[in-house]
Image (cartoon, grey):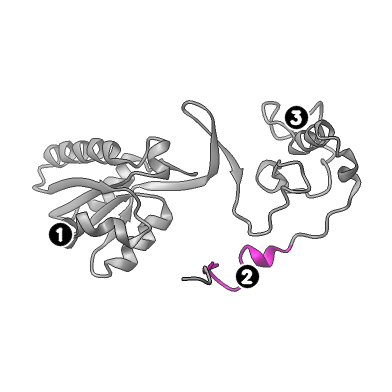
Amino acid sequence: MIVGQQKPFEEIWQLVKDHKQFTVFGCNTCVAVCHQGGNKEAGILASQLRMRAVQDGLEIKIDDSGIERQCEHEFFEKAEELIQGSEAVLSLACGIGVQFMASKYPKTPVYPALNTTFLGDVPETGLFSEKCQACGDCVLGVTGGVCPVSRCAKRLLNGPCGGSTHGKCEISKDTECAWQLVIDRLEALGRLDDYEKVQPIKDWSKDRAGGPRTFKLEDF
């Protein structure tokens, strides 16, 4: 899932305070799971902004709404009239949703209310952990399902660095060494021989070179 974190309130306020009307618009998929971007959060943020407007003596009409996903055309149908009638939109989606809306509504300013942070999982309620950087050249098949790109501080592809001690990363005693996790996993799978296989230099061109990446299904 995509994990995001709401921007500091003052930063958000500076983005929208000069508008006479705008809509706080939630996204009810990824960022709603981390309780940062759903309809509920849009309503709460809208209330906070209304109170700030009153405090500053500003007359601003602030609406709030949301849809299932801000990155697909089909979900915008029910909100089309609201968005078209908005002077601006404050989006509680990831950076993808913000850019999608900005492209879909070129004459409407679309501001981000969140900072998109990483792709992660939910190891326990209220905790979100980075597990993937969407690098485009996945090595999980040879590292036992543990990603050294996102979980190793140095993105090492062939074993731990000299700073790893007792299974912990040198940057923090609370951070597990990604390569110790790889070794433990491979050993549990009976595939420890894979650890001795030297991995080639990563092809970072699949990650960034050539501009934005695309993926097209041939049947569509």
Q: Earlier in the sequence, mark 1 or mark 2?
A: 1
| Percent x, y of residue 191 | 86, 39
Q: Against 187, is 73 above or below? A: below
Cβ–Cβ below 8 Å for labels 1 and 2? no
Residues at marks 1 and 3, CA–CA distance in whole angstroms:
53 Å
Q: Earlier in the sequence, mark 1 or mark 3?
A: 1
| Percent x, y of residue 175 | 68, 31
Q: Using the rendered view, name the quadrant where residue 51 is placed.
A: top left
**Which structural element holds mark 1?**
helix
Residue type at tag 3: Lys
Direction from residue 56 to residue 44 in the image, left or right: right
Residue under the image location 41 percent in, 37 percent down: 33
Q: Against 72, is 149 above or below? A: above
Q: Against 200, is 127 above or below? A: above
The residue carrying mark 1 is 81
- The circle drawn on residue 209 is 2
Residue under the image location 40 percent in, 43 percent down: 31
Residues at marks 2 and 3, CA–CA distance in whole angstroms:
33 Å
Q: Which residues are magenta?
A: 203-216
The residue carrying mark 3 is 168
